[in-house]
Image (tube, rainbow, N blue to C red):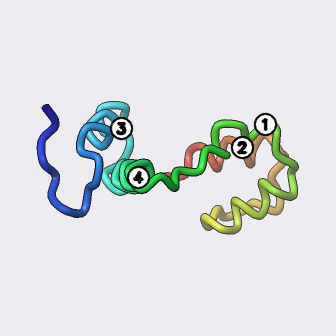
Amino acid sequence: MARDHGPQVKDDALYEELRKQGQSKEKAARIANAKAKGSLDHRATHLEDRTKDDLLKEARRIGIAGRSKMDKAALIAAIRDHG
């Protein structure tokens, strides 16, 4: 049974699983809450299928520095590593 992490975490079991996988507390909470709300966006699992322009927009949205000089592979790695 998952421990109760308070009202700020909506899916305690998923939160604990993500923390075991090494996710930060903040990222684990965001994912668990989005999943519980039904608004989890699965685009990140198919980054290779997205255009470089789309990846640049995503990198800008999440605040990755140096994105304009990155190629597609570097953008994908930076987006995945962002946490």
- The residue labelled by disc 1 is 48
Task: List x then y, in percent, for residue 76.
Answer: 72, 43
| Disc ID at residue 18 | 3
Residue 17 versus residue 32 in the image, above or below: above
Q: Are marks 4 and 3 in contact (CB under 8 Å)?
A: yes
Instruction: Tell me the mark number nearer the camera, choosing from 3 and 2.
Output: 3
Q: Residue at x 56, y 45 (%)?
A: 81
Q: Are marks 1 and 3 in contact (CB under 8 Å)?
A: no
What amino acid is at disc 2?
Ile
| C-alpha separation, residue under disc 3 versus residue under disc 2 | 21 Å
Per the image, label 2 sits on a secondary structure element best described as helix
Q: Residue at x 47, y 52 (%)?
A: 38
User: Which is nearer the N-term, disc 2 or disc 1?
Assistant: 1
- The residue labelled by disc 4 is 27
Question: How many residues crowd around disc 2 within 10 Å: few (fewer than 14), some, or many (20 or more)?
Answer: many
Question: In the drawing, does residue 15 fall left or right of residue 73?
Answer: left
Task: List x then y, in percent, for residue 15.
Answer: 30, 43
User: Which is nearer the N-term, disc 4 or disc 1?
Assistant: 4
User: Which is nearer the N-term, disc 1 or disc 3?
Assistant: 3
- The residue labelled by disc 2 is 76
> Would you identify the image quadrant in which residue 33 lies?
bottom left
| Disc ID at residue 64 | none
User: Which is nearer the N-term, disc 4 or disc 3?
Assistant: 3
What amino acid is at disc 1?
Glu
Residue 66 versus residue 38 in the image, above or below: below
| C-alpha separation, residue under disc 4 versus residue under disc 1 | 22 Å
Q: Are marks 2 and 1 in contact (CB under 8 Å)?
A: yes
